[in-house]
Amino acid sequence: MDACIIAGFSIIVILASISLTGAWLSDDSKGLKISCTITIIIAIGAFLCAYVRNPFCFNGDEGMIGTIATIVSIPVAVLLGWNIYTVVDFNRKTEKLENKVEKEIQGIKDENKRLIGDAEKSFLNKVSALQNELMELNKKVDEKYEECKSYVDEKIQKERDRNILKDLYQMALENMNGQNYAISFTGFCNIAYIANRQNETSYRDRSIEWAQNILEYHDENIKRDISKRPFNSVLNKVETIQTDEAKALVNSIKDLISSQQEINI
């Protein structure tokens, strides 16, 4: 009989040990684990003290059957309790896992949001930089356009002035060929003045040369018209030309004016 009681008690102790081991391996708080351990130790101690002081005695088969039923019911109750605990613990762990998963998902969302924000900020910075570069490029294009426009306008104006000089030069030659020497002389002097301002050295030098030739070979014809032509104005214009040929022409004009004044006196 004692062997049966000891066997039953051993089964209870083994089951309690298994439960206690599972409790210590779980994620429960340390205080709960200590409480369960103390409770089981107290229960075992109380059973041993009760058995030592008042051993079990059975009166007939009913007592034996009741004892056996009691011993069998204890592990059944423990197993049921363990199953209930396992279900509760599983639900608790599931809830913790769900919370952990939700936190990780939220962390991933926050990280994605941060990455998207950084990417958007970087993209906006690049767009802003590109816009600034585009503005600078447009500014440079406008500046180049203005430079090209000014250059083209200058070239067009020079071409127009050159054509005007060409026409004036042709008219002066025609007047010289028509023996209108005074008109031709005045024209060549004006052409030399205009060509000098426009840096057209070719027309300037040729016009001065023609004017000098007219003075040398047709001075009498010019003297007759000197009172009709603004020679002083022509003289002032030729004096602005700083070349040796122009200076020689200025001296010739001054001599011509002086001689004419002496004749008038």
Image (cartoon, grey):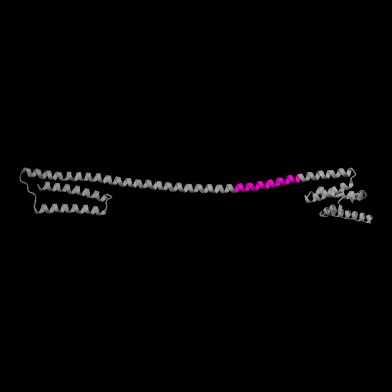
Count of numbered circles on the image: 0
Horizontal and vertical percent for residue 30?
26, 54
Which residue: 75% across, 46% down?
158
Q: Is residue 112 left or right of residue 220?
A: left
Horizontal and vertical percent for residue 184?
87, 46
Q: Is residue 170 left or right of residue 36?
A: right
Q: Is residue 122 left or right of residue 110?
A: right
Which residue: 12% across, 54% down?
49
Question: Residue pushed farthest left?
Answer: 60
Say whether residue 156 is magenta. yes
Horizontal and vertical percent for residue 151?
70, 47
Q: Is residue 62 left or right of residue 140?
A: left
Q: Which residues are magenta?
A: 136-159
Residue 133 or residue 218, whichever sits in front: 218
Horizontal and vertical percent for residue 238?
83, 53
User: What quarter of the picture does the C terminus occupy?
Assistant: bottom right
Say whether residue 57 is magenta. no
Q: Quadrant of residue 91?
A: top left
Q: Main secondary structure of the magenta part?
A: helix
Q: Quadrant of residue 64?
A: top left
